[in-house]
Amino acid sequence: MANDLLKNPWTVDTASATAILTDWANLRSIQWIGGTTAGHEAVIQDKDGRVLWRRLATGANQDFETVFPERLGHPVNGLLVPTLTSGVLYLTFV
């Protein structure tokens, strides 16, 4: 499978040092499904390298979800996923 950035939510299954978003956007939620092994990690940064979201699996088959309560979502200035050791990220935008 490859990253799918054409529909909402975005599906990201491949880590890269290249930004997948270079402009401002409002995130509604982040889901990490299928962290397969304890110690696996998912990291999302803004385009300036600031960590926006990081989760570490403490066991097999863990799922994480963050829903931003603000009505307009969480504003981000670019996105990149430099670390995704297993599973798939689902990024939903407002």
Image (cartoon, grey):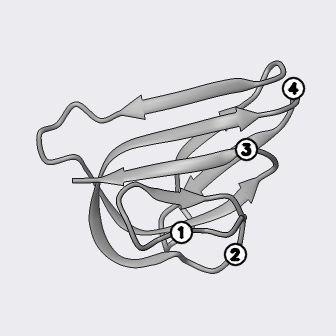
Q: Judge the density around disc 4: few (<14), some (14-19), many (≥20) Cα neighbours within 10 Å.
A: few
How far apart are labels 4 and 3 at the CA level?
Answer: 12 Å
Name the residue tied to disc 2: 17
Give the label, 4 or 1, closer to the camera. 1
**Dot placed on the residue nearer the N-terminal end, 1 or 2:** 1
Are circles 4 and 3 on residues that touch, CB within 8 Å?
no
Expressed as whole percent of the image width and height from the top left, the position of residue 62 reads 71, 23
Q: Under tag 1, what secondary structure?
A: loop
For image coordinates 60% across by 60% down, the residue present is: 12
Quarter holding residue 33: top right
- Residue furthest to the top in view is 59
Name the residue tied to disc 4: 38
For image coordinates 37% across by 66% down, the residue present is: 7
Q: Judge the density around disc 3: few (<14), some (14-19), many (≥20) Cα neighbours within 10 Å.
A: many
> Against 71, is 3 above or below?
below
What numbered label is drawn on residue 72? none
What numbered label is drawn on residue 87? 3
Q: Nearer the viewer, residue 29 or 7?
A: 7
**Dot placed on the residue nearer the N-terminal end, 2 or 3:** 2
Q: Three-letter amino acid code at disc 1?
A: Asp
As drawn, is 70 to the left or to the right of 41?
left
How far apart are labels 4 and 2 at the CA level?
Answer: 23 Å
**Dot placed on the residue nearer the N-terminal end, 4 or 1:** 1
Q: Under tag 4, what secondary structure?
A: loop
For image coordinates 63% across by 80% down, the residue present is: 18
Name the residue tied to disc 1: 4
